[in-house]
Image (tube, helix red, strand yellow):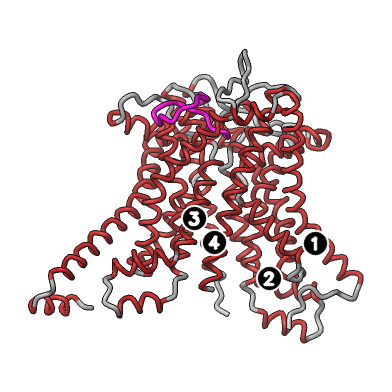
Amino acid sequence: MSLRGTRARSFGERAIGGGLFVAGGFSVLTTAGIVAVLFWESLAFFRRVPIGEFLTGTQWTPLFEPQHFGVLPLVVGSFLVAVIASVIAIPLGLGSAIYLSEYARTRTRAILKPILEILAGIPTVVYGYFALTFVTPLIRPFVPGLGVFNALSAGIVVGIMVLPLIASLSEDAMAAVPRELRHGAYALGATKFEVAARVVTPAALSGIMASFILALSRAIGETMAVVLAAGMTPSLTFDPRESIQTLTAYIVQVSLGDTPFGSIEYQSIFAVGLVLFVVTLAMNIFGRWFLKRYRQVYA
Amino acid sequence: MTADHLSAVSVLGTPPELERRRLWGRVFKGICLAATAVGVASLVVLLVDVAVDGAGWLSVTFFTQPPSRIPSRAGIGPALIGTLWIMGLTALITFPLGVAAAIWLEEYAGRGWVQTVIQTNIANLAGVPSIVYGILGLAVFVRWMAGITGGRSVLSGALTLSLLVLPILIIAAQEAIRAVPSSIREASYGLGATRWQTVRHHVLPNALPGILTGTILALSRAIGETAPLIMIGALTFIAFVPDGPRDDFTVLPIQIYNWASRPQDDFRHLAAASILVLLVLLLSMNALAIWLRNKYRREW
């Protein structure tokens, strides 16, 4: 029998329980704070810039005249970096996950997994430095027309950064596939590759998809690597060789300057933040829904 | 199947189709191994690159002096102290709050809707981009609570980072508490202990190593955070050390950003040297966490 959720008799016990509840509920207050702040200041912003113009405009020039507040260049910038990151991280992460789950010995896995996790723990500003001073000079001879600041290098390092997330979550999903499925396939004469690629991977698919979505969301929310490596040029382009600006980088750019509270530039970071928050939250909820699905199947 | 077994089969002759399938299997294994190797190699290249760029710039001056326009005189003194301030305050704020929340979720809450809402909310908060916490910190701690926090201060920075790492700490502490077997709780209740006595004397002491490991890992996330602190206005150029929680401040990652964003090579080398210091701090924290986990690991 569990005593969870039952009521304590003495006053002291109840007071302690109440105090602990307040601490637990504090997180809800944080969420409420985020939502309230973003909506409140965005509302003030949308009184000055029509919301239709904000969402569909193709020019983002808030810091010089004439001011335009079309958020599309920033959204495209964020997605461009996220797509490049996915192109790097999805095959590498999935390959690592299959290797760790299906091929590596227990001891090899015990060494490799923490090493990959260190990659995820390195501060993003370090990745920014790496992109700017190492990756860009390295790939410049191979990519004609590559600028000093470009979306490509930023995307590559963000890809390296989210690779462990994909590897780790996908490996968890594959490890959760019951042994019996593998044995059944072997008994039918499948080779190890066929078991890995045609039995385990499809069986773990919802967990793998979840890892992709969560990684994409992380890439969109990534800030310092893109600030340092992708530059501060909000232009509506799909060319990865050019300097762009992401949603996150714009917020940093305004904070670095001396923007007075209450000015339209100050309010604009809340509107941009709201877009970022809504996009990443939607992806996270969707991703965790996928995760839950595979856990229900095999748990 | 052993290698001998396989060769015996091939002497007898394997169907060409099976041979082809096995070959493709070996190629695929190679591809997967290569994918893993790319990740590991990236880490090595990154570390070596930073070490080569920055190692030569580490000196006593570098650790003690404030930043300067002249690279050879520049140092990370204020940034290092600022980082220690921020980390200390963040630990003080998050540890009690996070552990209390975890205890409530694991030991007190029933499996009702309140618990579900709070748990889901914590999971969602853990995925919110760090810069959004910066926006929250700017509006709430820097502006609304300026009278208490002193505006763009160490305290505002620590509060912002506390909100950021709290979900990570709560989730880790919950796992540590969950790992304590229920037989211990039942024995305690059986002897007539109240719920709080059970938690205080049995659950917490047994979960403590796990909780500490989680706390250190959560703080190691905070130590490298840059964007939220830029948002709340940590200075990019500061020549003095904060005297108290209401003072202006800067931290290592911001110093790194500042130097890395300048085009001159010397400043980039200073950035690399600062990265080395940050990574050493970070890796020591991780090593401490792993050591704690292994030292106090218990099989129930």
Assess whether mark 3 and mark 2 are in contact (beta carbons under 8 angstroms): no
Q: State the separation of the CA atoms marked 4 and 2.
A: 32 Å
Residue B156 appears anywhere in the view? yes
Other residues around mark 2 within 10 Å, as few (<14) / some (14–19) / many (≥20):
some
Residue furthest out toward the right: A11
In whole angstroms, how far apart are the C-alphas of marks 3 and 1? 32 Å
Q: Amino acid at mark 3?
A: Ser
- Is A277 in front, or is B208? A277
Q: Is label 1 or label 4 in front? A: 4
Classify residue A2 by image quadrant. bottom right
Left or right placement of residue B296 versus residue A98 in this view:
right
Q: Which mark is residue A21?
A: 1
* Chain of residue at mark 4: A
Task: Write down the residue under mark 4.
Answer: A291
The residue that appears at 42% across and 59% down in the rendered structure is: A113
- Name the residue type under label 4: Leu
Per the picture, the main secondary structure of the magenta-coloured stretch is loop
Left or right of residue A65, residue A150 in this image: left
Magenta segment range?
Answer: A232-248
Q: Which residue is mark 3?
A: A211
Find disc 2 in the rendering and name its residue: B205
